[in-house]
Amino acid sequence: MSNWKHISVDDLQAQYQDWNVVDIRDADTYNQGHIPGAKNINNDNINQFVDDADHSKPLAVICYGGKSSMGAAEVLSNAGFETVYSVDGGMMAWQSTHPNEMESSES
């Protein structure tokens, strides 16, 4: 039984500013463009994120196309986050529907 749910990019777009958003894509791709305020997490820093994050805030997990985020949503819901969502369609869907709501970390 999964404790996480699916969310569309449109539903996420309406409320992500008040949420924890984690992007599980590789750092280079994340740096090229991500949802404003999203944290890039991977196996090296996930424990730190779990320790530091507010577990009562909704958490959205995004990846490239919406598949990998489901496994990460499962892991994070088991780590004690109360409300976890996997973003359907991932960043490919976000970039096509909300191209003006992106930030990059490139210097």
Image: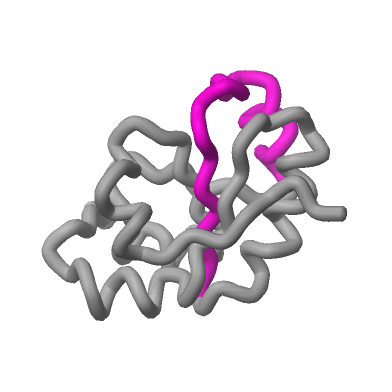
How far from the left and from the top, in percent, is residue 69?
63, 63
* Residue that appears at 36% across and 64% down: 9
Among the 4 quarters of the image, the one containing residue 49: top right
| 60 is higher (above) or lower (below) than 80 | below
Quarter of the rendering containing residue 18: top left
Way the structure is coloured: one colour
Q: Which residues are magenta?
A: 44-64
**Where, quadrant-wise, is the N terminus in this rendering?**
bottom right
| Residue drawn where x is 18% and y is 57% of the image | 101
In the current view of this chain or complex, which residue is farthest to the right?
1
Q: Nearer the viewer, residue 8 or 38?
A: 8
Question: Is residue 21 positioned above or below 81 on the image?
Answer: below
- Measured as percent of width and height from the top left, residue 59 is found at 53, 40
**Left or right: 62 in relation to 106:** right
Apparent side of residue 70 relative to residue 90 in the rendered image (left or right): right
Q: Position of residue 19 (x, y in %)?
A: 41, 35
